[in-house]
Amino acid sequence: MLESLILSLTVFALAMFIGYTVITKVPPTLHTPLMSGTNAISGVVIVGALVAAGMTDSGLSQWLATGAVVLATINVVGGFLVTDRMLRMFRRRERPDAGK
């Protein structure tokens, strides 16, 4: 039991370190495509959390799975809002007709 907890915490710490290292090396021009890819991954997390919530009998597990669904949903919605805002910066502005 203790060995699996230590192993899980080690994997979690390494994943955080690797994730931070990878994200800080992304150039600014790739942030929008990276955000879109992250939204797709978060959608998979939502499906996995829903499956986990449906398969558990423990109340604590259901609460944790529900929390995972809520947090992943917030992440997806926020990602789409940020991506939409960034893409709106590249749209052409309509010029008012000066001659009419």
Image: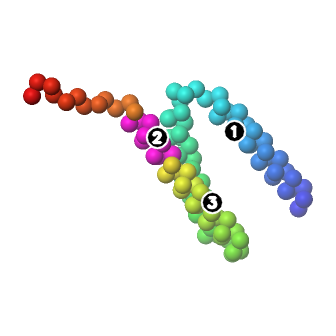
Image point (57%, 47%), residue name: 41
Please indicate, yes or no, whether residue 22 appears anywhere in the rendered image.
yes
Image height of 51 relative to 21, above or below: below
Residue 85 part of the magenta-drawn span = yes
Q: Secondary structure at mark 3?
A: helix
Q: Which residue is mark 1?
A: 19
Q: Which residues are magenta?
A: 79-88
| In-front residue for pair 5/90 | 90
Please indicate, yes or no, whether residue 52 appears anywhere in the rendered image.
no
**Tag of residue 54:** none
The amino acid sitting under disc 2 is Thr
Q: Which residue is mark 2?
A: 83
Mark 3 vs mark 1: which is more N-terminal? 1
The amino acid sitting under disc 1 is Gly
Mark 2 vs mark 1: which is more N-terminal? 1
Q: Which residue is mark 3?
A: 68
Image spot of residue 9 (x, y percent): 82, 51
3D distance between C-alphas at marks 2 and 3: 22 Å
Other-residue count near label 3 (Cα within 10 Å), few / some / many at <14 / 14–19 / ≥20 = some
